[in-house]
Amino acid sequence: MTESTPLPVIMLKPPKGFSALNLRDLWIYRELVFFMIWRDIKVRYKQTLLGAAWAILQPVMTMIVFTIFFGNLAAVPSDGVPYPIFTYTALLPWQLFSKALQDAARSLVANRHMITKVYFPRLVLPLSSIMAGLVDFAIALVVLVGLMIYYQTPLRWSMLSLPLFLLMTLITALGVGLWFAALNVLYRDIAYVMPFLAQFWMFITPIVYPASMVPERWRMLYYLNPMTGVVEGFRWAMLGTVPTLPINMILLSVGVSLVVLVSGLFYFRFMERLFADMV
C-alpha cells in the first residue's frame, strides 16, 4: 500500500482591521445602492399633495418661526447679517442631518423583508436612506440663493468650500445613524428616542444663535458637537459671518465625525450577523 497524501489544512480566520468592514461590497452592489436611493426618493413624494414643495416649506416655515420669536422678540444676535438668512443657512445642513439620522435609524426595521430573504451588504440600507436626503437639500438650497439675492449678499470664494461641509454633514449622519440603526434592531424604543434626540441636538447646535455667544472657556467642549463645525462652516462659506474660520475648532469637529463614523462602521459590522434573526 502506498502512503496516502495528507490533505491540506485550511484555517479560516476572521478578517481584522478595515478589511473586516467589507467596504468593497458597496462597490460591487453599487447598482443596488442607486436603486434604493431612487426608491426612497419616489416613496417620499408619492401621493403627496405638495410633492417636492415640502423640501422648501419645512425650512422656510421654521425660519419664519425662529425669526419672529428669536430674531424679533428675543433679539438674538446674528453676526451682523439679517436674521432670516442667518438661521436659514444653518437650517439647511441641520435638516439634512436630522432627516438622514432618523431615516438611517429606521432603515433596517423598515426593510426587514429584504434582510430576512436575500443577502446584500446591510450597509446599503442606511447609506441609501442618507443619500436620498440630498434631493431635499438641493431644492432648499435654491431658496437660500434667492435669499442671498434679496439681501444682496455678495459672492465669496469661500462658497467653493461648501461641498466639504456637506460631506462632513453626511459623514456625521452616517456614523450616528449606523449606531442607532443597529441598536434599533435590538431595542425598538430607539425609534421613539430619535425625535427627542434630534430636538435636543438642535438646541446645542448654533442654529438660532451664533457660536460666538458661547463663553470662550466652553468653546472647546462646544465644538465636540460635530454639527457645530458644520453649521459655522456653512455660515462662513455662504455669508462670511466671521473674517476667518476657526480652523482648530473645525478640525476638532472633523475628528469627532470621523471617530463616530469609524466606530459606527465597526459596531454595525459586528451586529450584522444578528440582524436577520432579530429584525
Image (tube, grey):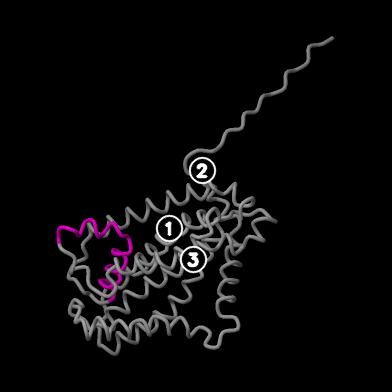
- 197 or 143, which lies in front? 197
Is residue 23 shown above or below 166? above
Residue 229 sits inside the magenta stretch:
yes
Say which quarter of the image contains residue 244.
Answer: bottom left
Indicate the position of residue 12 as horizontal and vertical percent values.
61, 32
- Residue found 29% across the figure and 84% down from its top: 148
Q: Say which amino acid is labelled 3.
A: Ile
Question: Could you tell me residue 131's position as x and y percent?
Answer: 49, 67
The magenta segment is 216-238
Quarter occupied by residue 231: bottom left
Report whether 219 appears left or right of 98: left
Secondary structure at badge 1 equals helix
Report the Cα–Cα distance between label 3 and label 2.
23 Å
Local crowd at mark 3 within 10 Å, few (<14), some, or many (≥20)? many
Query: In the rendered image, which quarter contains the C terminus?
Result: bottom right
Residue identified by numbered label 2: 19
Q: What's the residue type where badge 1 is placed?
A: Val
The tag on residue 176 is 1
Give the residue drawn at x 59%, y 54%.
121
